[in-house]
Each structure stands twice: as structure tokens, then as C-alpha cells.
Image (cartoon, rainbow, N blue to C red):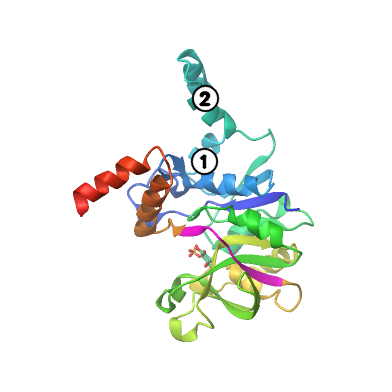
Amino acid sequence: MIKKAIFPVGGLGTRFLPATKALPKEMLPVVDKPLIQYAVEEAAEAGIDEFIFVTGRNKSAIEDHFDHSYELEKTLIAKGKTEALTVVHDMIHKPGSVSYVRQQDPAGLGHAVWCARNMVHNEPVAVLLADDLILGKSCIAEMAKHYHGGNMVAVMNVSMDQTHAYGIITPGTDDGKLVEVMGLIEKPKPEDAPSNIAIVGRYIIEPAVFQTLSKSERGAGGEIQLTDALAQQIGKSAFFGLRFSGERFDCGSKMGFLQANVAFAMANEMLAPNLKKWIKDRYS
Ligand code: G1P
């Protein structure tokens, strides 16, 4: 059973400036909920009840978001807004189950995960990148169901000209759902890519990965890459990619973020009919 999840949230979000000048990019809302809350809820659906945020400077809004806001709660009570009150109460986790660690330098995803090492003991841990938003079934719950030790990543097929944006696997046996990972390379050019099967930001990693990360070896882009540390486990323990059933949106890009907003609104029965009509009237 996976009990802990790491959320690397130290990134600067330069692609969303000026919105992310003072606001953490993980707080950007899709419809009415910040990206980071979707990721936390996805983890909770997998039975995870310890949440470790690897933050950076200017990220205090994330800490406030998962804490009480007594002023707001008092006002909602006074105005009898019980529905809104339930929304803000439901997102408060048991005291002590949310922790924060600072990544002082943005030295890469592997470095961010390594910063959480003292909060993880001899146990597998989930890693969720809030930029990758998944509509549908909880991806990490699906992974946990299929996890029997070693390492696991969520994967999806991308077009060959997109391999430079992802970790790409060399596939082994493949039953259509679980694909064995025989090799792993971070952001290869199409001509160097071993396949078009890409890692989406959901991982279950074993303790040995932290030992590799402590060597602080720099990889693609001069950063300490999680992909490289995972690649070193190949042949030593089980390693699978899971083709998840949900739909993934790349909310690290403007287009993906806009698509996510439309898709999540269309999946919301209160908003869908009017939005559909408005889009039809205005754009067709
Ligand atoms: C990170 C990982 C990459 C993975 C991607 C998924 O890259 O390093 O292996 O495929 O997330 O979104 P980033 O998008 O943070 O550059």
C-alpha cells in the first residue's frame, strides 16, 4: 500500500507570466480548483494520506490553500453558505499529514524528489506533477492497483515530434495496459528516441532511487533528472509503465491549460449545457 506522495511544486512557471509572477503556477485554476488540489485529490483516491510538498520561494499560497481560513469560514457560517463551507472543510487534512520542504535551487525534478528523502523511509512513494492534469479515473490509484514492487511510471503514446518534451521508454513486453520498461531517456530528439511512449508525471518509486539521486548526477538540460535515477534501476528491480485510462492535459502549456478548462467545464453538468451553446453560437 502506498501511503505517501511527493508533489514537486518548486518550478517558476515562466510559461505563464505574468500570471505566475506572485502566484504559484500550481495554484492556477482549472474551472474552480487549483491544479495542485486536483493532484492531491487524485492521490487521496489512491488511499494516500501523507502529502509532501517540495516547494520553493513564493509558494506560500499553496500552504495557505491547504490550511484553515478562519475568517472565511466564520463569514460562510454567518451567511449560512453551507455548501461553500463544506468545500473548504473537505480539503483540510488530518493535522501532521501535510508537510513542506524547500528546494533551495531549482536543480531539476530528481533534485526536488531527493529533497523529500528525510520524510520517506524504507517504502515506495508516489510522485505527482500537478502540471499533468488527468480527467477521469485517478491515475495514481490505477497505478497503485497494478504495483507489485520496483518502479512504475504512467505512460502514453505521443507523436514522434514531441519526444523532446518527455522522458521516453524503450518498451519490452507489453499487454496493452502494462508495458515493461527496458530503457529510459530524458527528452530525446525524435531521431534518438527509442519509441514514442512517453512518461506522464505520475511515478511510484522505490527507496533505491533516493540513493541514486544523492549522487547528484546532472543529465538533460544540466538538471538532476528523475528519469536518469529511474533508468539506473533497470535490471535490478521490476519496472513497468502503465497506460492509464484517464485523459491527460499538459497544463504546463497554455494550449493544454485552455483545453483542460474546456474539457473539465464540459464534464461539469452545471456548466456544460450553457458553455456548449455559447461556443456553438459564437464560433461555428
Ligand atoms: C517531466 C519529466 C519527464 C516527463 C514529464 C511529464 O518533464 O522530466 O520525464 O515526461 O515531466 O510531464 P517536465 O515537463 O517537467 O520538463
Q: Is residue 247 magenta?
A: yes
Q: Position of residue 173 (x, y in %)?
A: 66, 80
Pick whichever, 113 or 194, lies toward us: 194
Q: Secondary structure at mark 2?
A: helix
Residue 220 pos. (x, y %): 51, 74
- Write down the quadrant of residue 169 in the picture: bottom right
Residue at the farthest right position: 122
Name the residue that disc number 2 marks.
85
Q: The disc labelled 1 sits on which kind of residue?
A: Ile
* Mark 2 C-beta closer than 8 Å to ligand 1: no
- Ligand 1 within 8 Å of disc 1? The answer is no
Magenta stretch: helix, strand or loop mostly: strand
Q: The magenta stretch spans which residues?
A: 239-248
Real-space Cα distance between discs 1 and 2?
19 Å
Evaluate whether residue 42 shows in this view.
yes
Taking depth in this image into account, of 177 and 194 the one nearest to the observer is 177
Image quarter in which the C terminus is found: bottom left
Residue that label 1 marks: 62
Residue 240 as seen in the image, left or right of residue 271: right
**N-terminal of the two: label 1 or label 2?**
1
Secondary structure beneath label 1: helix
The answer to whether residue 119 is left or right of residue 255 is right
The furthest residue to the bottom:
191
